[in-house]
Amino acid sequence: MNQRVKASPATPALRQGKNGDGAERHEAIHRSISDAIIEHRLKPGARLREDALAEVFGVSRTGIRKILQRLALEQLVTLTPRRGASVTRPTAEEAKDVFDARQMVECGLMPEIARRITSNDIAKLRDMAQREREALQSGEQSSAIRLSADFHSYLAGISGNRTLADFVERLCSRSSLILAVYGNTGHLGCESHDHQDLINYLAEGKGERAQAFMSRHLKAIEASLSIVEEENEAPDLFDIFAS
Amino acid sequence: MNQRVKASPATPALRQGKNGDGAERHEAIHRSISDAIIEHRLKPGARLREDALAEVFGVSRTGIRKILQRLALEQLVTLTPRRGASVTRPTAEEAKDVFDARQMVECGLMPEIARRITSNDIAKLRDMAQREREALQSGEQSSAIRLSADFHSYLAGISGNRTLADFVERLCSRSSLILAVYGNTGHLGCESHDHQDLINYLAEGKGERAQAFMSRHLKAIEASLSIVEEENEAPDLFDIFAS
DNA sequence: ACCTGGATAGTCGTATACAATAGGTCAATG
DNA sequence: CATTGACCTATTGTATACGACTATCCAGGT
């Protein structure tokens, strides 16, 4: 099975590219897989075999397991006890919870963000929004989705509250997953001009307006989803046992 | 249900106490360590050697590492690259962030909680508050802290939003850590009657009042802390390099 | 007496080997 | 022809062995 030539016992060919420090490497692998999921290159339900990943990234299964666990805690992958890892397929309820959470946290953060935002931040945000728009217009949905998530994450980071910013980042990642399952192709989540308008409000220091706008923005995304709980193929038995 | 005897060759003496299924065992170990940290039986800064934990719980280091990683992601323990694991010592900034986050989320959840709370929930909450009070009066600080965290977590769970409830639970755990570092002994975080009052508001369906009360409650806890950033023992060198 | 350099030991990081289990496939029977 | 049973393969879960790095301790020099 292991078709690796394995010339030297402890130094696969792929590894010499990076420095020996494994921490950064693991971080890179994590981001790599994470990005692939967020960009929908790995679709919900896709199985993530440890051996395959280990071979692709040139590390042992041990390291992959660590990363997979972390992804599981971030709820991007689901770890079923002896079936292995697969990209999480969010339920309709989870989708609702995620958007409710975003509604509460992202909107609640807006006043503070408006207070602390710097011209540097504004420039950065404009650049991100611009790139997102370009990606959208050139049909690169994958990049657009990721850029949109990055936009929201960066925005939350301006608040200065790392705890909440990290939470928002995870919510955005999960949102991307939700879009992959319940989103209609063609009608992407975020309208590009929305982000530009939001930046304008913040640049003018209108925190209240920005908050209300973000609320509508998130509601619009959620409304664009077609959340239909697909029926289990064999619910009858469960119903019988439940009764 | 599977009562397989499983006299397998690899069965240390400690392991036969539990069922062979490792998943539940790991969950139990996780909770065990987590509780010890939350109850201040393990104080911030305490080192957590893998070998020692492995021996204590009768599993191999592999399993311990998995649990340690999970605890690290929950920010209860800090994993320094080659120094090992230790109980996290929150910084003053983290403390502020955590309480700001709790302010936003827990208060924001109150209206929904007031809407969905059942008589069963109320009974459960009253019981928890009562036990907390008893623990407080009998001087069992450890139990009181944990019960207080449980109270807030259970409360958040009533909202029905698992994502936010989990977040609150983690914030409460971290709060316990913060109390261990910055709290004054004798003046515990939550006043016991506060929780009882809060239940009353919720029982009467007064979501707004409950929200305001929770806000004051959290502010009171935060105010009771004596957040003094302890000086680094050798800041001079860093200052020199920073200038 | 203090500082610096080296040696040692302890601990973590990684890889590999073994064991158990779940799912799939094939065949046999009603 | 469908269904069920058993076998078999593939994949994960666990443990252990080895290697690398860091911290501590001690000796020597200034």
Image (spheres, coloured by chain):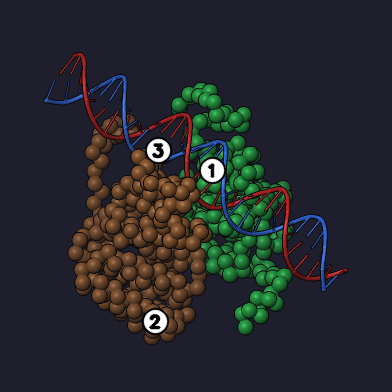
Chain colours: A brown, B green, C red, D blue
Task: Relative to B199, say whether B26 is above or below.
Answer: above
Task: Determine whether, in the image, residue A237 is placed left or right of residue B37.
Answer: left
Dot 3, crowdedness within 10 Å: few (<14), some or many (≥20)?
Answer: few
Q: Do labels 1 and 3 share a chain?
A: no
Q: How far apart are marks 1 and 2 (CA)?
A: 46 Å
Tag 2 subunit = A
Q: What element carries label 2?
A: helix
Query: The residue under label 3 is which amino acid type?
Result: Arg
Tag 3 subunit = A
Q: Quadrant location of the N terminus of chain B?
A: top left
Q: Quadrant location of the C terminus of chain B?
A: bottom right
**Which disc is residue A122 wearing?**
2
Q: Distance between the residues labelled 3 and 2?
A: 47 Å
Q: Distance between the residues labelled 1 and 3?
A: 17 Å
Dot 1, crowdedness within 10 Å: few (<14), some or many (≥20)?
Answer: few
Query: The residue under label 2 is which amino acid type?
Result: Ile
**Which disc is residue A82 wearing?**
3
Q: Residue at x 58, y 70 (%)?
A: B93
Q: Residue at x 32, y 69 (%)?
A: A148
Is residue A242 visible in this depiction of the protein?
A: yes
Q: Residue at x 63, y 39 (%)?
A: B55
Q: Which of the two discs, 3 and 2, labels the residue nearer the N terminus? A: 3
Q: What element carries label 3?
A: loop
Closer-to-camera residue (C20/B241): B241
Residue A113 image-quadrant placement = bottom left
Which residue position holds label 1? Answer: B62
User: Looking at the picture, how far across and down is residue B212, in whole percent?
Assistant: 51, 66
Query: The residue under label 1 is which amino acid type?
Result: Thr
Task: Determine whether, in the image, residue B98 is placed left or right of residue A100.
Answer: right
Asked whether the residues under the numbered discs 3 and 2 touch, taking CB atoms below 8 Å apart as contact, a structural biologist would say no
Closer-to-camera residue (A35/B73): A35
Foreground mark, 1 or 2?
1
